Image (tube, grey):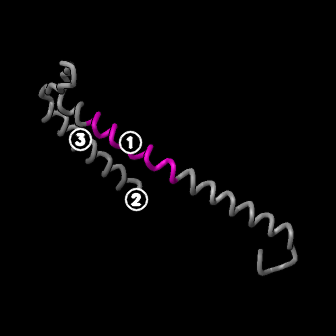
Amino acid sequence: MRYFYGLLTGILFFAVLGFAIKNAEPVTLHYYLGMSWSAPLVLVVLASFALGAGCGIIACLGLVVRQRRAANAIRQELASLNTAHPSNPEIS
């Protein structure tokens, strides 16, 4: 299985490398107020992917924090039940 992941990683690396080599032409992004930025196309695509992934992670953080708090509350309640009724086999 370890060799399979290594092979898969190598294939993915060469696919991304080929994408980068094929898309090395410079592109110009135009912003408001006459501002512009010139960069290789692959860099623009990578930056937009990273920005989108970052926004997705930030959007999920609230749900993760809420679920973690609920899980901690359940753990504390379970611990208090175990200490209150240590001889009851149904709770343990």
* Residue beneath disc 2: 1
Q: Which residue is at 43% across, 47% downward?
A: 59
- Give 56 or 41, whichever is nearer the viewer: 56
Q: Position of residue 29 (x, y in %)?
A: 18, 27
Q: How far, Cα to Cα, is label 2 from label 3?
A: 23 Å
In the rendered view, tell whether residue 9 sits above or below residue 17: below
* Dot 2 alpha-carbon crowd within 10 angstroms: few under 14, some 14 to 19, many 20 or more: few
Residue designated by label 3? 16
Question: Which of the 4 quarters of the picture holds residue 32?
Answer: top left
Picture mark count:
3
Region rendered in magenta: 46-63
* Label annotation for residue 55: 1
Q: Residue 47: say if magenta.
A: yes
The percent position of residue 82, horizontal first and vertical second, equals 81, 69
Image-based side of 27 in relation to 85, left or right? left
Q: Is residue 54 left or right of residue 61?
A: left
Kindly identify the residue that appears in the image at 18 percent across and 39 percent down.
Answer: 19
